[in-house]
Image (cartoon, grey):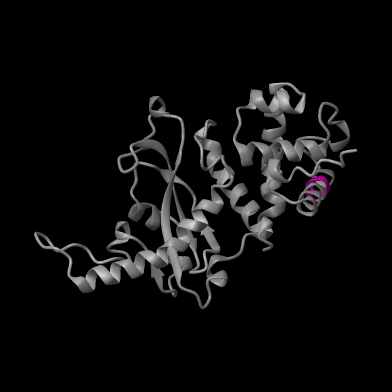
Amino acid sequence: MAGPLSWNITTGLDTEQLDGLVARVHQELVQDPDPPVMPGRMWALGLYKSVVLVLFLLRQNPVQEVAAELFGISQATVSRRWTALLPMVEKVLATHVPDPTEASAGRIVLVDGTLVTTWDWSSEGTTMFSGKHRDTGFNLQTAATLAGDLLAVSAPVPGSRHDMHAWRQSHFPEAFAEREGIGDLGYAGSRLFTPRRKPPGQERSAGDKRANRSVNTLRAAVERAIAHLKNWKILATRYRGPLTRFPDIVKTVTALTFYTRGW
């Protein structure tokens, strides 16, 4: 006989982490004087599976109609659970997100930007198109250690803005002001150490090439951190929701990433 479902692949959490998260969400709901949902009145789908549903939407990024069919509920119920519980998940896990200045103490900080693709919302007057990536989306700044451990994720900015602008708009310059930092050529002009540019009309010297290879080898760690962050497919495959909700999704995924790694 098959045992109870673990939901590990569905949610990205092990059983202990999932049970702990559901318990925290339940406690938060019963203590809320005006909760968005009542745990005892979630007849279509109980609280446990409702939290699993929210994590599934973040982890796998299916369309809501697919999630509704898999969970045996209506698309409207999926939408209601998503709207009600996503903020609760972020709220109860917020304490797992470390202060970036404290977390980076004594460490070299690696910084890189990544594009999270979205639907083309140009009809709404937004400027989401990234010329570098030839696609629409948000620019997220990510900081990591030389070991590839995530330190921080910035608030999103429109994909039309380059990494230097996104860096300046983020909290990173202040958070890592006392740290040695490394970035790619997109951060030239910042206080970060970057590879050496090719001199106008000349080739790079052998010394410059060796130095750049060393820098790029070190920078691979932040790319690994981004890859781990994008295990939450809502950041890796095209985001289809309202743009106004995306900052909350970034905060929730960031909190979940630290939570699953034991912060």
Residue 47: give x, y in percent of width and height: 81, 38
Horizontal relation, residue 50 to residue 216: left or right: right
Indicate whether residue 174 is drawn in magenta: no
Q: Is residue 64 above or below residue 16?
A: above
Residue 160: give x, y in percent of width and height: 34, 41
Give the residue drawn at x 68%, y 56%: 260
Q: Quadrant of residue 167?
A: bottom left
Give the residue drawn at x 50%, y 63%: 144
> Is residue 171 among what the camera can see?
no
Q: Quadrant of residue 65?
A: top right
Residue 62: give x, y in percent of width and height: 61, 31
Depth check: 175 or 110 in front? 110
Residue 5: give x, y in percent of width and height: 81, 40
Secondary structure, magenta segment, majority class: helix
Give the residue drawn at x 61%, y 64%: 98
Q: Is residue 24 above or below residue 240?
A: below
Depth check: 140 or 27 in front? 140
Q: Quadrant of residue 73?
A: top right
Horizontal relation, residue 219 to residue 211: left or right: right
Which stretch appears magenta?
A: 24-28
Q: Farthest bottom residue?
A: 106
